[in-house]
Amino acid sequence: MIISLIGYMGSGKTTTGKDLAKAIGYEFVDLDEFIEQKYQTKIPEIFAAEGELGFRKKEREALHEILTNTNIVLSLGGGTPVYYNNMEEITKNSVSFFIRVQLPQLVKRLENKKETRPLIAHLTNDELTEFVAKHLFERNQYYEKAKYTINVSNQSTLQVLDQIMNHLKAEKTRN
Ligand SMILES: Nc1ncnc2c1ncn2[C@@H]1O[C@H](COP(=O)(O)OP(=O)(O)O)[C@@H](O)[C@H]1O
Ligand SMILES: O=C(O)C1=C[C@@H](OP(=O)(O)O)[C@@H](O)[C@H](O)C1
Ligand SMILES: [Mg+2]
């Protein structure tokens, strides 16, 4: 089984994915880290050299490659479900979880974590709220296609993990 985590930048996909993989003994794959290793380049450098479109093409290819695996926890990038038919591939080949974090929490987390995320790196903290609000409005329709939604306001990563594990238990007894 592949378990995929989707959601906006800062929703905790990478952090929670690592913990989840450890808890259930699956291999952990982070799509951004996979791309960085494959091309020996950091994400902001790919955006700078090839633009967002160049990154999205690499992202789609990497996704395709990873989805042939089994028994992995896959943390996606915030934009992965939005491009090409990626979300269709994700829902077809994995048990998907949308980690939905409230806007103020997202913004608070992203304020000092902008530089590794080229889409928001140029924004001031004041501009961030408006940008994220609009961006979420556009993207939520894709995220909402995930099989399960985990709602997060102030829950710790451990609490998020717990909710995911409960759904997985139910998933296993059904199969
Ligand atoms: N449940 C949580 N509560 C508080 N902070 C969190 C939680 N989950 C993640 N974070 C923090 O939010 C930031 C972004 O997390 P990250 O896993 O990189 O998100 P993503 O991969 O979705 O962009 C990190 O600093 C991380 O420590
Ligand atoms: O939302 C996006 O379009 C992006 C999210 C990033 O991943 P995280 O969601 O892990 O920050 C990374 O893939 C890239 O900077 C683009
Ligand atoms: Mg991440």
Image (spheres, grey):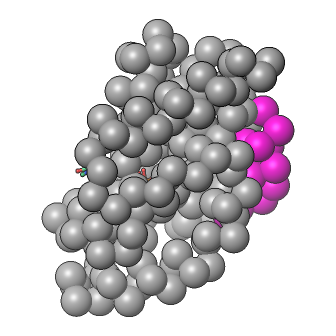
Residue 46 in percent (x, y) is at 46, 54
The x and y percentages for residue 134 are 50, 86
Residue sitting at x 69%, y 34%: 95
Does the image show residue 109? yes
Asked if the stretch drawn in magenta spans residue 94, the answer is no
Between residue 108 and residue 35, name the one nearer to us.
108
Give whichever of 80, 91 is nearer the camera: 91
Q: Nearer the viewer, residue 54 or 4?
A: 4
Residue 115 visible here = no
Q: Quadrant of residue 2?
A: top right
Left or right of 23? Residue 67 is right
Quick one: 48 or 57, which is closer to the camera? 57
Residue drawn where x is 31% and y is 82% of the image: 128
Q: Quadrant of the N terminus?
A: top right
Point out the residue furthest to the top here: 25
Q: Which residues are magenta?
A: 82-93
**Rendering coords of residue 173 (x, y %):** 71, 18
Residue at image point 80% right, 18% down? 175
In the picture as drawn, the residue positioned furthest to the left comes out as 112
Residue 85 falls within the magenta-colored stretch: yes
Magenta region, main secondary structure: helix
Residue that appears at 43% across and 45% down: 13
Q: Position of residue 10 (x, y in %)?
A: 35, 58
Describe residue 93's horizontal placement relative to residue 105 as left or right: right
Is residue 105 shown above or below 174?
below
